[in-house]
Amino acid sequence: MIAYLDNAASTAPLPEVIEAMARTMRDHFANPSSLHSLGAAAARALTTAREQVAALLHAEPGDVIFTGSGTEANALGLLGAARASRLRHVVVSAIEHAAVFSSARRLADDGWQVDEVAPGRDGCLTAEAVLAAVKPETAVVAVMLVNNEIGTLQPAADIALALRALGRRIHFHVDAVQAAGLVRLDARTMGAHSIAISAHKLHGPKGIGALWLGKGRRLAPLYGGGGQERDLRSGTENLPACVGFGVAATAALADTAAAQRVRALRDRLESLVFAGTRLATPTVHPTTPRAPHIASLLLPGLPAEPVLHALESRGIFASEGAACSTHSREPSRVMRALAVPASTGALRFSLSRLTSAAEIERAARGLVDALAEIDRAVRPGR
Ligand SMILES: Cc1ncc(COP(=O)(O)O)c(C=O)c1O
């Protein structure tokens, strides 16, 4: 048995997702835009998938745009809203995923003014700090709901309220990719104008995301083409992936006890580890508002990489910081924002609603063991 605790990087597709996708590839290969009956059947499957994804967001299906990833949904939300505006200033948090951060950097290259809002030492933003960065020229504010490295929950609804109180038409974009499936998402009450999610974080397929777009909001498409997805995301729809996303969304929505279960398992992992070793410490205080599925641990004076290898040799799969950004060896922007020294390694254990108690026991025991072994090797004689 292995312990897979890298679910924030990606989750295993559910068997019913795989089956539904295979069936769609076989039975609904026609183009949903074709006027014949096979096209109409494919279009119906697309409609069902859109309804299922919308249900996860408590939104209307007509407001959901399928994209090729969470990254693309974020790019469409942020770049699309900025480019549709006459104004030339955007505000993002300093702990955004590369999906948002690099879109903001692209805007800066194109002459937009970009301001970053730093979180507090607890890894959380405040509505006041976001509001302080807003200017008369602000077109878009983009903030993530759950940080992918440390799991902190950001006060999106408070930020939305504060922005609304300004009485201007600032577009508020929320990256909810790490939240979907384990944090309740309600597009009607969040106060965002666009929300990005991704299927592979909730036991759906990779390569399919969605952007919810509030009524009356305008976006400039990232590119043109056949006009699919309300002219906002051209390209023949990836129907098998849309169907897989729909099935995964329905399963996530039906598992109403998931967040509570996952939180209890995450807390158990943390308490076993902190009771078993003094070499790992919590990245954020346990009372910080956090999503249920991410445990972030610091290793003062130890690099993360050898620990990850030692874990893997014990059948435990976790990650260092954010798996999505391991292509760059730059220090994590999140750890920098939290003033974590460069000599301190960071580990991320991320659970899903399918994580078992046995995996948690195994991971905790394995980490305590691995740290003791590495400590003996690094500091002999102790
Ligand atoms: C917070 C956050 N936003 C966006 C993304 C990108 O999603 P995708 O992998 O579907 O492009 C990720 C992926 O890890 C993420 O964690």
Image (spheres, rainbow, N blue to C red):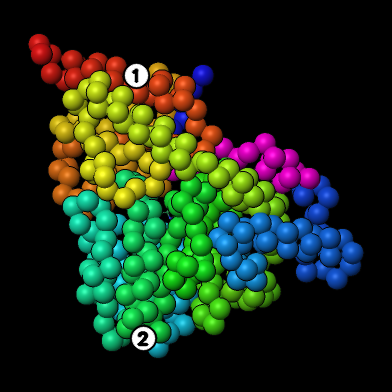
Q: Which amino acid, by three-letter code, is at mark 1?
A: Arg
Residue drawn at x 66%, y 57% is: 52
126 vs 170, nearest the viewer: 126
Instruction: Judge the density around disc 2: few (<14), some (14-19), many (≥20) Cα neighbours within 10 Å.
Output: few
Residue drawn at x 25%, y 27% is: 274
Lateral position of residue 190 relative to residue 37, left or right: left
Query: Which residue lies under the disc numbered 2?
Result: 167
Q: Which mark is residue 104?
A: none
Please state the extent of the stretch shown in magenta in the rendering: 8-23
| Residue 325 seen in render | no
Instruction: Judge the density around disc 1: few (<14), some (14-19), many (≥20) Cα neighbours within 10 Å.
Output: some
Image quarter of residue 271: top left
Lateral position of residue 23 relative to residue 180, left or right: right
Q: Position of residue 42 (x, y in %)?
A: 80, 60
Vertical relation: 7 (above or below) 372: below
Lateral position of residue 274 relative to residue 265, left or right: left
| Residue 227 seen in render | yes
Marks 2 and 1, how far apart at CA: 53 Å
Query: Which residue lies under the disc numbered 1?
Result: 365
Q: Which amino acid, by three-letter code, is at mark 2?
A: Gly
Residue drawn at x 79%, y 62% is: 44
Q: Position of residue 121 (x, y in %)?
A: 18, 52
Badge 1 marks a residue whose secondary structure is: helix
